Amino acid sequence: MPKAYPWNSILQPVHHDNTKCTEGNNIEKQYLRQGTGGKPLCKHCQRLDVAGQ
């Protein structure tokens, strides 16, 4: 499973932890922050994590 240290965008209400998440991978560098930012996990990341992908 390609889980990674969580990251988030200052423009999104969620954080990401799966390197296969297209939403998480499309964050522009200037908006990218490490950690959860106190935000809930992205639904796409959740689905990928549960599926073991």
Image (spheres, rainbow, N blue to C red):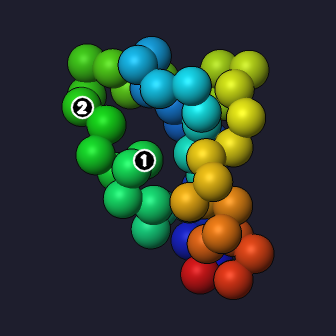
Q: Please provide percent x and percent y for residue 26.
A: 28, 46
Mark 2 residue element: loop
Tag shown at residue 53: none
Amino acid type of the residue tagged 2 in the rendering: Glu
Q: Please provide percent x and percent y for residue 13.
A: 57, 25
- Graded by Cα atoms within 10 Å as few (under 14), some (14 to 19) or many (20 or more), the crowding at tag 1 reads many
Nearest the eye: 5 or 41: 41
Mark 1 residue element: helix
Q: Is residue 43 left or right of residue 12?
A: right
- Graded by Cα atoms within 10 Å as few (under 14), some (14 to 19) or many (20 or more), the crowding at tag 2 reads few
Q: Please provide percent x and percent y for residue 5.
A: 62, 46
Marks 1/2 in contact by CB < 8 Å: the verdict is no
Give the total of numbered labels. Answer: 2
Question: Residue placed at 36% from the left, 59% from the top?
Answer: 22
Amino acid type of the residue tagged 1 in the rendering: Gly
- Report, in whole angstroms, how far the alpha carbon at label 1 lies from the one at label 2: 10 Å
Q: Is residue 22 left or right of residue 13?
A: left
Q: Which residue is mark 2?
A: 28
**Up/down of 13 relative to 5, above or below:** above
Q: Which residue is mark 1?
A: 24
The quadrant the C terminus occupies is bottom right
**Up/down of 33 relative to 24, above or below:** above
Question: Residue placed at 60% from the left, 59% from the top?
Answer: 45
Nearest the eye: 13 or 6: 13
The quadrant the N terminus occupies is bottom right
Rendering quarter of residue 2: bottom right
